[in-house]
Image (cartoon, rainbow, N blue to C red):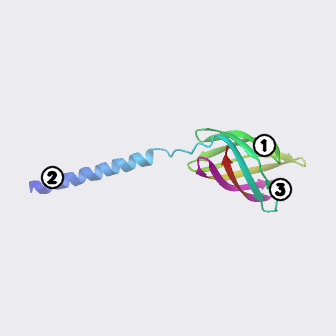
Amino acid sequence: MLTSHRAGRQTSMRIFRLGLTLAMVLLVPSQAADISGKWVFSVDLEDGGHGDPTFVLKQQGGKLSGTYDGPLGEKEVSGTVTGSQATFGFSMERDGETVKVTYTAKIDSPTKMSGTVKFEGAGAGGSGKWTAAKQ
């Protein structure tokens, strides 16, 4: 009977430790990949257009800021990073209307990203795919 009580107590302690470990893992926020730096993109649009813009990104926690320099001019960029995903972009004027340009990224490694780009507004609907390498 003493052995049975001890075995039950050991099982309870194992379950408690397992639960505590699981709680610690779930409560620790996932670290976002740091994509700060200069990135050269290769963008292919669905309509056949192509561009090679450069982004200079600065990440602070889950927030992104920076600049875009490419076929659409020079623009201020803002966005977010969560884990291995990022969303960033900018707005621009075309024919007196605002066009929103949004890049959605999968962070493949510290030096490679890929994803999609979407243009919205002022009759500028369109999208494309891109890859990027960190310089």
| Distance between mark 3 and mark 1 Cα atoms | 19 Å
Identify the magenta region: 107-128
Distance in Å between CA atoms under marks 1 and 2? 69 Å
Name the residue that disc number 3 marks: 124
Q: Residue at x 15, y 52 (%)?
A: 6
Q: Earlier in the sequence, mark 1 or mark 2?
A: 2
Residue at disc 1, secondary structure:
strand
- In the rendered structure, the answer to whether residue 32 lies left or right of residue 42 reads left
Residue 121: horizontal and vertical position, in percent? 81, 53
Amino acid on which disc 3 is placed:
Ala
Kindly identify which numbered label has been placed on residue 6. Answer: 2
For the residues marked 2 and 3, what is the alpha-carbon distance in whole angstroms? Answer: 71 Å
Residue at position x 19%, y 51% from top?
A: 9
- Residue that lies at the very extreme toward the front in this rendered image: 135
Residue of label 1: 69
Q: Residue 108: where, in percent of width, then height?
A: 59, 53
